[in-house]
Image (cartoon, rainbow, N blue to C red):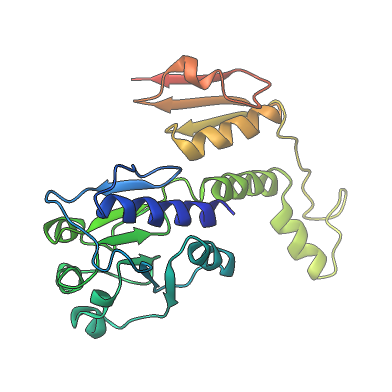
């Protein structure tokens, strides 16, 4: 759901930005770089055409369509991109499978293309400088996957503390690895354990709040975060110590 909302906010806000409206990129979408010259969207009276090249959840596509976009979902080859296939669209949404080079962006910008949206965090598969030179706004969704990564981190913490991988393999091979069985290992509780975090960004803050709610002692290091910020995270039942450089 967070990814769906981020993508919808990302594209609607970026299209408004590209059209010269006084609407900032909002919600959990962020403009990676705004073009240096004024730009406008062609056919402004018609629905904005949005291409999705790497697939999105049906609910995300529905959300875009409900916002008035004319959505097309299909993959493109590198040759098609360089030949100007993006020129027929006002915006393109990619994930990690599509790479947008400067020549593809320039060819697209010669037509309708004004916005590139990355449904995710990294923009390493987009030539941001090339987009900037062509007047194309690049936006991403830096917090779209935060909850998922936080939950995965907690799952791995539980698995490590309870020796779940070894227990799973033993059970599948017909062994019940419970003391005093050979090869058995006792699990341990996370409550009362020390958890160290290097960096204290969005994901680390989410992990810290969840771990503190479980009763873990959380220690974080960050060259940016303030100690008082760490101590006020919602859900924390134990103090969170954050060292700053």
| Left or right placement of residue 8 versus residue 93 in this view | right
Across and down, in percent, residue 245 comes to 33, 20
| Of residues 157 and 139, the one drawn nearer to the viewer in this rendering | 139
Give the residue at x 50% y 40%. 203
Left or right of 189: which side holds 46? left
Relative placement, left or right, of 122 versus 105 is: right
- Rendered position, 136 above or below 108: above
Q: Nearer the viewer, residue 168 or 211?
A: 211
Count the marks: how many? 0
Residue drawn at 37 percent across, 66 percent down: 94
Judge by depth and name the residue closer to the eye, 32 or 112. Answer: 112
Q: Nearer the viewer, residue 195 or 13?
A: 13
- Residue 211: % across, % down: 64, 32
Residue 170: quarter of image: bottom right
In the image: residue 203, left or right of residue 100: right
Query: What quarter of the picture does the N terminus occupy?
Result: bottom right
How far across and down, in percent of the image, does residue 160 sit? 66, 47
In the image, what residue occupies the spot 75% across and 35% down?
189
Q: How far across and how far down the image is residue 85, in percent?
A: 26, 80
Relative to 70, is 40 above or below? above
Residue lying at 42% horizontally and 51% vertically, measured from the top left: 141
* The image quarter in which residue 51 lies: bottom left
Single out the residue that lies furthest toward the front. 45
């Amino acid at each position: 759901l967070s990814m769906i909302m981020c993508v919808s906010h990302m594209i609607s806000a970026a299209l408004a930005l590209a059209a010269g409206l006084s609407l900032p990129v909002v919600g959990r979408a962020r403009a990676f770089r705004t073009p240096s010259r004024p730009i406008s969207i062609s056919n402004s009276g018609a629905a904005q055409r949005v291409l999705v090249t790497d697939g999105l959840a049906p609910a995300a596509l529905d959300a875009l369509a409900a916002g008035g976009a004319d959505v097309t979902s299909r993959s493109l080859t590198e040759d098609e991109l360089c030949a100007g296939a993006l020129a027929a669209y006002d915006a393109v949404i990619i994930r990690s499978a599509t790479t947008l080079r400067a020549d593809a962006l320039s060819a697209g910008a010669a037509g309708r293309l004004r916005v590139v949206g990355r449904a995710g965090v990294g923009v390493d598969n987009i030539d941001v400088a090339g987009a900037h030179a062509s007047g194309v706004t690049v936006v991403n969704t830096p917090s779209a996957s935060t909850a998922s990564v936080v939950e995965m981190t907690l799952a791995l913490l539980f698995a490590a503390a309870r020796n779940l991988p070894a227990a799973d393999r033993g059970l599948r091979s017909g062994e019940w690895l419970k003391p005093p069985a050979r090869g058995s290992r006792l699990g341990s509780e996370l409550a009362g354990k020390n958890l160290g975090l290097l960096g204290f960004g969005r994901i680390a803050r989410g992990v810290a709040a969840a771990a503190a709610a479980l009763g873990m002692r959380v220690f974080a290091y960050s060259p940016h975060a303030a100690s008082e910020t760490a101590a006020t995270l919602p859900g924390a039942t134990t103090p969170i110590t954050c060292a700053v450089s």
